[in-house]
Amino acid sequence: MAKFTDVLLVEDDPITVMVCDRIIKMSSFADKVKSCENGKIGIEYLLGLDENCCAPTIIFLDINMPIMNGWDFLEEFEKIKWRFRSLPRIYLLSSTVDPEDYKKAKKFPLVQDFISKPLNREALQNII
């Protein structure tokens, strides 16, 4: 399994955050996991990183969150991605089966795939 430097988890449900954090750490998937409870806090976190640094290697992003949802996060990230030397790979964490969500995700080149909740070891193994 690949090991990444850091993961940003943008998710509003505390139980899902706990499960994801535990799976990521138990799998030795990443050295560091940072979680943000909505898209707005996620964007603020990214804006707080030094300019011209690296963005987190992987972002796991929930679609349905209060304050700023995953789609709004992606729109905002497009505006600030110039700040980063390297860009993350983004995986949408969702239980959606709506074909429109899959279609919408294709508009964002950094979105690699959908991962069904809950995050599990098998899903992490498929990320190379």
Image: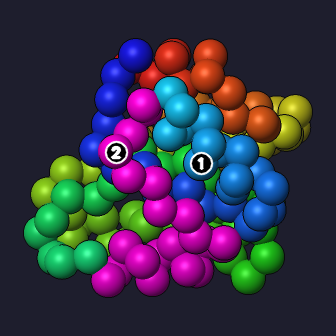
Residue labelled with disc 1: 21
Helix, strand or loop status at disc 2 = strand
On screen, residue 70 versus residue 77, left or right, reads right
Magenta range is 28-48
> In the image, which disc is placed on residue 31?
2
Q: Residue at x 19, y 51 (%)?
A: 86
In front of the other: 102 or 32: 32
Q: Residue at x 51, y 16 (%)?
A: 126
Give the image's coloring scheme.
Answer: rainbow
The amino acid pointed to by label 1 is: Asp
* Magenta-span inclusion, residue 46: yes
On screen, residue 66 versus residue 105, left or right, reads right
Q: Residue at x 35, y 22 (%)?
A: 2
As displayed, is residue 102 above or below residue 86? above
Rendered-image quadrant of the N terminus: top left
Q: Quadrant of residue 54?
A: bottom left
Rendered-image quadrant of the C terminus: top left
Horizontal and vertical percent position of residue 21? 59, 48
> In the image, which disc is placed on residue 107?
none
As displayed, is residue 40 above or below residue 91? below
